[in-house]
Amino acid sequence: MSDDKNKNQKEDAREEIKESGQLVLDKNKKKNHIQLITIIGEVEGHDNLGSNSKTTKYEHILPKLAAAEDDENIDGLLFLLHTMGGDVEAGLAIAELIASISKPTVSLVLGGSHSIGIPIAVSTDYSFIVPTGTMVVHPVRMNGTVIGAQQTFDYFKQMQARISWFVSHHSGITEERFEELMMETKMLTKDVGTILEGAETVEEGIIDEVGGLKEAMAELQRRIARRRSNN
Protein backbone atom coordinates (compact mmCIF):
# COMPACT_ATOMS: atom_id res chain seq x y z
CA MET A 1 0.00 0.00 0.00
CA SER A 2 2.82 2.34 0.92
CA ASP A 3 4.69 1.55 -2.32
CA ASP A 4 1.57 2.37 -4.35
CA LYS A 5 1.19 5.68 -2.51
CA ASN A 6 4.84 6.62 -3.14
CA LYS A 7 4.48 5.68 -6.79
CA ASN A 8 1.38 7.84 -7.15
CA GLN A 9 3.13 10.75 -5.43
CA LYS A 10 6.10 10.48 -7.80
CA GLU A 11 3.79 10.36 -10.81
CA ASP A 12 1.89 13.41 -9.55
CA ALA A 13 5.19 15.26 -9.03
CA ARG A 14 6.35 14.44 -12.56
CA GLU A 15 3.05 15.64 -13.97
CA GLU A 16 3.27 18.86 -11.94
CA ILE A 17 6.74 19.58 -13.33
CA LYS A 18 5.63 18.79 -16.88
CA GLU A 19 2.53 20.99 -16.72
CA SER A 20 3.71 24.01 -14.75
CA GLY A 21 7.35 23.62 -13.66
CA GLN A 22 6.29 23.49 -10.02
CA LEU A 23 7.21 21.05 -7.29
CA VAL A 24 7.27 20.70 -3.50
CA LEU A 25 10.81 20.03 -2.22
CA ASP A 26 10.58 17.98 0.97
CA LYS A 27 13.60 15.65 1.01
CA ASN A 28 15.95 18.04 2.82
CA LYS A 29 17.54 17.25 6.19
CA LYS A 30 15.45 19.86 7.98
CA LYS A 31 12.23 18.25 6.68
CA ASN A 32 10.92 21.61 5.52
CA HIS A 33 8.38 21.73 2.71
CA ILE A 34 9.51 24.23 0.09
CA GLN A 35 7.29 25.20 -2.81
CA LEU A 36 9.37 25.54 -5.98
CA ILE A 37 7.93 27.85 -8.62
CA THR A 38 9.56 28.62 -11.97
CA ILE A 39 9.13 31.81 -13.99
CA ILE A 40 10.37 30.77 -17.42
CA GLY A 41 10.12 32.12 -20.95
CA GLU A 42 7.66 34.95 -21.52
CA VAL A 43 5.18 36.06 -18.87
CA GLU A 44 1.85 35.58 -20.60
CA GLY A 45 -1.00 38.02 -20.13
CA HIS A 46 -4.52 37.92 -21.51
CA ASP A 47 -3.41 36.79 -24.97
CA ASN A 48 -2.20 33.24 -25.62
CA LEU A 49 1.28 33.21 -27.13
CA GLY A 50 0.99 29.87 -28.90
CA SER A 51 2.23 26.35 -28.29
CA ASN A 52 5.70 27.06 -29.72
CA SER A 53 6.53 29.66 -27.06
CA LYS A 54 7.88 28.95 -23.60
CA THR A 55 5.53 30.85 -21.32
CA THR A 56 4.63 31.44 -17.69
CA LYS A 57 0.87 31.79 -17.42
CA TYR A 58 -0.21 34.16 -14.69
CA GLU A 59 -3.55 32.35 -14.30
CA HIS A 60 -1.52 29.30 -13.22
CA ILE A 61 0.93 31.13 -10.97
CA LEU A 62 -1.55 33.28 -9.01
CA PRO A 63 -3.67 30.35 -7.70
CA LYS A 64 -0.50 28.41 -6.87
CA LEU A 65 0.80 31.31 -4.79
CA ALA A 66 -2.50 31.65 -2.97
CA ALA A 67 -2.56 27.89 -2.31
CA ALA A 68 1.00 27.97 -0.93
CA GLU A 69 0.09 30.82 1.41
CA ASP A 70 -2.97 28.90 2.61
CA ASP A 71 -1.22 25.53 3.01
CA GLU A 72 0.15 25.15 6.56
CA ASN A 73 2.45 22.39 5.31
CA ILE A 74 4.37 24.80 3.04
CA ASP A 75 7.21 26.42 4.98
CA GLY A 76 8.73 28.64 2.30
CA LEU A 77 8.86 29.36 -1.43
CA LEU A 78 11.79 29.29 -3.86
CA PHE A 79 11.46 31.02 -7.24
CA LEU A 80 13.72 30.14 -10.17
CA LEU A 81 13.69 32.78 -12.92
CA HIS A 82 14.83 32.63 -16.51
CA THR A 83 12.52 35.02 -18.32
CA MET A 84 12.64 37.53 -21.14
CA GLY A 85 9.85 39.52 -19.50
CA GLY A 86 6.43 39.80 -21.07
CA ASP A 87 3.05 41.27 -20.18
CA VAL A 88 3.58 44.18 -17.78
CA GLU A 89 0.25 43.97 -15.96
CA ALA A 90 0.52 40.20 -15.49
CA GLY A 91 4.13 40.47 -14.32
CA LEU A 92 3.29 43.17 -11.79
CA ALA A 93 0.34 41.10 -10.54
CA ILE A 94 2.67 38.16 -9.90
CA ALA A 95 5.26 40.39 -8.23
CA GLU A 96 2.69 42.05 -5.97
CA LEU A 97 1.26 38.71 -4.87
CA ILE A 98 4.72 37.28 -4.11
CA ALA A 99 5.56 40.39 -2.07
CA SER A 100 2.40 39.92 0.01
CA ILE A 101 3.13 36.31 1.01
CA SER A 102 3.76 35.90 4.74
CA LYS A 103 6.04 32.89 4.41
CA PRO A 104 9.78 33.17 3.64
CA THR A 105 10.53 33.66 -0.06
CA VAL A 106 13.80 33.60 -2.02
CA SER A 107 14.42 34.10 -5.74
CA LEU A 108 17.28 32.91 -7.93
CA VAL A 109 17.92 34.41 -11.37
CA LEU A 110 19.31 31.89 -13.83
CA GLY A 111 20.31 33.00 -17.32
CA GLY A 112 18.29 36.18 -17.25
CA SER A 113 15.35 38.00 -15.71
CA HIS A 114 14.67 40.87 -18.06
CA SER A 115 12.13 43.66 -18.25
CA ILE A 116 9.07 42.83 -16.10
CA GLY A 117 11.07 39.88 -14.75
CA ILE A 118 12.98 42.40 -12.60
CA PRO A 119 10.03 43.27 -10.31
CA ILE A 120 9.33 39.55 -9.94
CA ALA A 121 12.95 38.85 -8.98
CA VAL A 122 13.01 41.56 -6.29
CA SER A 123 9.55 40.80 -4.89
CA THR A 124 10.89 38.05 -2.61
CA ASP A 125 12.40 38.51 0.85
CA TYR A 126 15.89 37.87 -0.55
CA SER A 127 17.25 37.52 -4.08
CA PHE A 128 20.20 35.82 -5.77
CA ILE A 129 21.64 35.85 -9.27
CA VAL A 130 24.20 33.47 -10.75
CA PRO A 131 27.50 35.07 -11.86
CA THR A 132 26.60 34.83 -15.56
CA GLY A 133 22.98 35.92 -15.07
CA THR A 134 21.76 39.10 -16.76
CA MET A 135 19.05 41.71 -16.42
CA VAL A 136 17.91 44.09 -19.14
CA VAL A 137 16.37 47.30 -17.80
CA HIS A 138 14.39 49.18 -20.46
CA PRO A 139 11.30 51.39 -20.84
CA VAL A 140 7.80 49.95 -21.23
CA ARG A 141 7.02 48.68 -24.72
CA MET A 142 3.78 47.64 -26.38
CA ASN A 143 3.12 45.33 -29.30
CA GLY A 144 0.51 45.94 -31.97
CA THR A 145 -1.09 49.21 -33.00
CA VAL A 146 -0.22 52.16 -30.79
CA ILE A 147 -2.06 55.47 -31.05
CA GLY A 148 0.42 58.32 -31.27
CA ALA A 149 -1.40 60.55 -28.80
CA GLN A 150 -0.43 62.28 -25.58
CA GLN A 151 -2.64 59.88 -23.62
CA THR A 152 -0.57 56.94 -24.88
CA PHE A 153 2.69 58.53 -23.75
CA ASP A 154 1.14 59.43 -20.40
CA TYR A 155 0.07 55.80 -19.96
CA PHE A 156 3.59 54.57 -20.73
CA LYS A 157 5.04 57.07 -18.27
CA GLN A 158 2.58 56.00 -15.59
CA MET A 159 3.39 52.33 -16.16
CA GLN A 160 7.13 52.99 -15.96
CA ALA A 161 6.60 54.89 -12.72
CA ARG A 162 4.72 51.92 -11.25
CA ILE A 163 7.56 49.58 -12.15
CA SER A 164 10.24 51.93 -10.82
CA TRP A 165 8.31 52.43 -7.58
CA PHE A 166 7.90 48.69 -7.03
CA VAL A 167 11.54 47.86 -7.75
CA SER A 168 12.87 50.65 -5.54
CA HIS A 169 10.59 49.64 -2.64
CA HIS A 170 11.67 46.00 -2.81
CA SER A 171 15.39 46.42 -3.43
CA GLY A 172 18.26 48.79 -2.70
CA ILE A 173 18.10 50.89 -5.87
CA THR A 174 16.42 54.29 -5.99
CA GLU A 175 13.65 55.18 -8.44
CA GLU A 176 15.88 57.84 -9.98
CA ARG A 177 18.76 55.45 -10.62
CA PHE A 178 16.48 52.72 -11.96
CA GLU A 179 14.96 55.17 -14.44
CA GLU A 180 18.45 56.28 -15.47
CA LEU A 181 19.24 52.67 -16.33
CA MET A 182 15.93 52.43 -18.21
CA MET A 183 16.72 55.42 -20.40
CA GLU A 184 20.42 54.74 -21.09
CA THR A 185 21.18 55.31 -24.80
CA LYS A 186 24.80 54.21 -25.10
CA MET A 187 24.68 50.47 -24.38
CA LEU A 188 22.08 49.04 -26.79
CA THR A 189 22.72 49.88 -30.45
CA LYS A 190 19.07 49.85 -31.58
CA ASP A 191 17.29 50.34 -28.30
CA VAL A 192 17.19 52.22 -25.01
CA GLY A 193 18.16 50.58 -21.74
CA THR A 194 20.92 48.83 -19.82
CA ILE A 195 22.24 45.29 -19.65
CA LEU A 196 23.50 44.29 -16.20
CA GLU A 197 25.42 41.10 -15.43
CA GLY A 198 25.49 39.16 -12.15
CA ALA A 199 27.68 41.25 -9.87
CA GLU A 200 26.55 44.52 -11.49
CA THR A 201 22.94 43.88 -10.41
CA VAL A 202 24.21 43.58 -6.82
CA GLU A 203 26.35 46.71 -7.11
CA GLU A 204 23.30 48.64 -8.34
CA GLY A 205 21.28 47.37 -5.39
CA ILE A 206 18.71 45.47 -7.45
CA ILE A 207 19.67 41.94 -6.40
CA ASP A 208 20.89 41.08 -2.89
CA GLU A 209 23.66 38.59 -3.62
CA VAL A 210 25.52 36.61 -6.29
CA GLY A 211 25.03 32.90 -5.72
CA GLY A 212 23.49 29.69 -6.95
CA LEU A 213 21.03 27.08 -5.82
CA LYS A 214 23.10 26.07 -2.79
CA GLU A 215 23.17 29.61 -1.45
CA ALA A 216 19.51 30.25 -2.25
CA MET A 217 18.38 27.08 -0.48
CA ALA A 218 20.56 27.81 2.55
CA GLU A 219 19.15 31.35 2.84
CA LEU A 220 15.59 30.08 2.58
CA GLN A 221 16.22 27.43 5.25
CA ARG A 222 17.64 30.11 7.56
CA ARG A 223 14.59 32.28 7.07
CA ILE A 224 12.24 29.38 7.69
CA ALA A 225 14.06 28.52 10.93
CA ARG A 226 13.97 32.18 12.02
CA ARG A 227 10.24 32.43 11.34
CA ARG A 228 9.56 29.22 13.24
CA SER A 229 11.55 30.41 16.27
CA ASN A 230 9.64 33.73 16.31
CA ASN A 231 6.24 32.08 16.25
Image (spheres, helix red, strand yellow):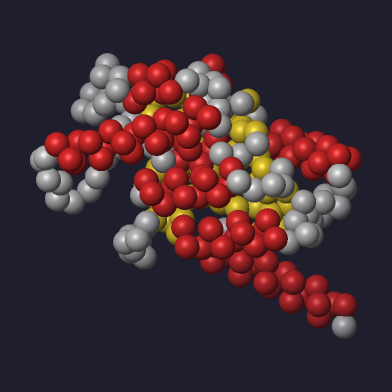
Q: Percent from the top left, x then y, of residue 190? A: 21, 28
As drawn, the residue found furthest toward the bottom would be 1
Depth order, front residue of 180/153: 153
User: Total marks drawn?
Assistant: 0
Q: Nearer the viewer, residue 134 or 152?
A: 152
**What's the residue at 48%, 38% (across, down)?**
119
Residue 125 quadrant:
top right
Q: Is residue 166 left or right of residue 191?
A: right
The x and y percentages for residue 207 are 56, 27
Decide if residue 113 is in sight here. no
In the image, 104 versus 12, the foreground residue is: 104
Residue 183: x %, y % from top left: 29, 23
For the residue pair 53 and 79, the one nearer the viewer reads as 79
Q: Check the image and report above or below for 225 versus 168.
A: below
Q: Quadrant of the C terminus?
A: top right
Determine if residue 57 is in view: yes
Residue at the limit of the structure toward the left, as seen here: 148
Quadrant in which the N terminus is drawn: bottom right
Residue at image location 34% in from the left, 25% down from the top: 182
Left or right of 179, for residue 202:
right
Question: Which residue is depicted at the point 82% across and 51% down?
Answer: 32
Q: Residue at x 46, y 57 (%)?
A: 58
The x and y percentages for residue 66 are: 61, 59
